[in-house]
Image: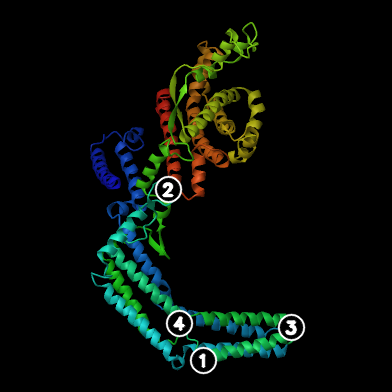
Amino acid sequence: MFTRILTFLIIVAIIGCVMYGRKIIKTEKVNAVFGNPERAKGGTHWIIVGSSFILLTWIYYSWDIAKSFYPQSANELCQVGKINDSLLALKYLFPIEERESKTASIIKIENKNLDKFAFEVKNSNKISDQNKIFLLGLIEKTKKIIPLLTNESLLDNQTKIKISELTSRIDQLSKEFQKNDYPYETIDQKNKRLKEAQEEGEWGASGSAIENTVEIPNIPKTDKGLKFHTAAKDLQIISDEFFKLNNHNFQYKSAVQVINDEIKKFENEINTDQEITSTFVKDILQIIARIDYASIFPPNSLKDFEESIINFEKVQKNEQGSLIWIDIFLFPAGTIVSSGLSCSEQGTGRWLPKLSDTFNNFILLLKPSVGYKGIPLLWYEMMDASKIVGFILPDWIADIIPGKYPVYNENGTVEPNFKSKTLAVVSGQFSLFKIPIPMGHIWDSFLRVFLGLVLGIIFGVPLGLFMGLNRFAKGFFDPLIELYRPVPPLAWAPLIISVLGIDNLGKIFLLFMVSFSIMIISARAGASGTQLSKIHASHSLGASNWQILRYVIFPNSLPEILTGVRVSIGMCWGTLVAAEFLAGTTGIGFVENVAKKYFQYEVIWISIFLMGVLGLIFDVTLRKIIDKTIPWRGKG
């Protein structure tokens, strides 16, 4: 229901916003010519169109529309996949979907291999003449065993009868398959099947946190699915019986036995080139084994059997009815396939999780009772406000108070005094009142990026301005900055995490290093790019150095600094996820890393989406700051 409503709203939003956009274009001001920045303002309707298009693509290619509008389609396609799986070996044996039959391909390849061996033996200088005669004779006899399998007159009657029986069974299955009451299920059998199907679960996300879901339900839930399921079992029995057949007639067995006897006789003799000859003998034996294993029959003996398979293929496709069109249009870039007793998604629906499953998983991961590895994505915990007091106030306040801390008395107790009570206050060891504090994977990642970014700005911007205004600072710090700036953050990660630990300190310091270099470059470029005429004008008006820095250089550098902040945000997010991949027990990167090991695609996409949303929140916030702090940008 969620996907149905969302799909309808998306289509309505796209159509409505496109019509609104065309109306705006017709009524647009004439003076808003090409190149005018005013033309880029607004356009919220196009944002809705773009976002809706992305959502619609996701819903469509994840097969969520198919799941929502036709919830039993995957189960029915699973049963169709079982028939295709049963037909696969039989169809591969004949030129139905391939240019040539498997038998023709094997005969062609093995004859080519035998001719190749004969050529190599004739032109070899390392094989004696006696062994050449032996090998060439062996090759010739091997080539002659193939006609013993393809000769119609040598096919024994028992094999002919069995092939005819299997052909009749396929024809009978084709007739029965077209009947509406096939496979003649009683009410009790139907109720039992539906009960088992209900217990199996619904079409859902494999390996997800959603309860009572399977990737593809295997037990047929509909009458159409039951028809294909039963036919697939009957067809699999026929296929197994057919491949137990072999055309190993008496003449063929005798010829193979002659070859084996000659090889055994050869192995008992001692020759100088025994090793080289033995290699060719082993290759010939492998060819005989492949011929023996292959289902080689006379070319016309399986003609009726092949036609029965082709006819059944047409019948089963006709019985699929509208399911064919559902498969074509609602299962793009893939379908449901069967392998043995299980079915699975093959295509975009496998690695692109359904929006409904992803949303349900996201809700579960937010709950503190579920979470991910015992920690919710984002929640809160009640913390005593005294902890904040203890964090702000330094402990040395208690140390400077005259007197000593209390010691225990003869009764074995410690009586507090003013000094110890003060220590309890400044260290937060007292009760005040509870306040909600954010916690969870999202909060941990957000806090790490925020602290690393803020520290980079606090230390990077002043140093960058100093380097842009002072020759000594530029010469002294520039080599140090440029030495570590080109090094990828991941190269520093193992060292920093090893020294500072896998806790927050190491990750925050790594993010600080990333933002620090970017902010230095940005601030230095802004300071050195200040127009000299503005500085001269300030001097003429009697401004001090501090006033010039405060009112001229810093505002002039602000666009470069804020641009650097935007770049730093993206770099910090990328670095944080990599750092949490390497080491960590919380954070979005940690969630994605663990989900990757268990192929939890829904959780992986949730973590990717969260990183994008948090990055967008940072960037939108910074845009608002830019609009407020440097409104003159682009209007000079």
Indicate left or right for 626 with 313 as reference: right
The image's mark for residue 110 is none
Q: Within 10 angstroms of label 4, few (less than 14), some, or many (20 or more) residues?
A: few
Q: Of callouts 2 and 1, which one flags the residue occurring earlier in the amino acid sequence?
A: 2
Could you say whether the residue bearing mark 4 is in a helix, strand or loop?
loop
Q: Give me the C-alpha separation between circle 2 and circle 3.
A: 63 Å
Q: Is there CB contact under 8 Å for labels 3 and 1?
A: no
Determine which residue is flagged by label 4: 245
Kind of residue at disc 4: Leu
In this view, 114 is above or below 12: below
- In which quadrant of the rendered view does residue 503 lie? top right
The image's mark for residue 208 is 2
Q: Give me the C-alpha separation between circle 1 and circle 4.
A: 15 Å
Q: Within 10 angstroms of label 3, few (less than 14), some, or many (20 or more) residues?
A: few
Q: Nearer the viewer, mark 4 or mark 3?
A: 4
What residue lies at 51% left-to-right and 40% top-to-bottom? 589
Q: Of callouts 2 and 3, which one flags the residue occurring earlier in the amino acid sequence?
A: 2
Q: Of callouts 4 and 3, which one flags the residue occurring earlier in the amino acid sequence?
A: 4
What residue lies at 52% left-to-right and 79% top-to-bottom? 293
- Which residue ends up furthest to the top in the rendered image? 402
- Which residue ends up furthest to the front in the rendered image? 411
Q: Nearer the viewer, residue 577 or 120?
A: 577
Determine which residue is flagged by label 3: 273
Could you say whether the residue bearing mark 1 is in a helix, strand or loop?
helix
Q: Nearer the viewer, mark 3 or mark 1?
A: 1
Residue 157 in sight: yes
Kind of residue at disc 1: Phe
Q: Position of residue 308 (x, y in %)?
A: 33, 80
Q: Is there CB contact under 8 Å for labels 2 and 1?
A: no
Indicate left or right for 478 with 27 as reference: right
Q: Give me the C-alpha separation between circle 4 and circle 3.
A: 40 Å
Determine which residue is flagged by label 1: 250
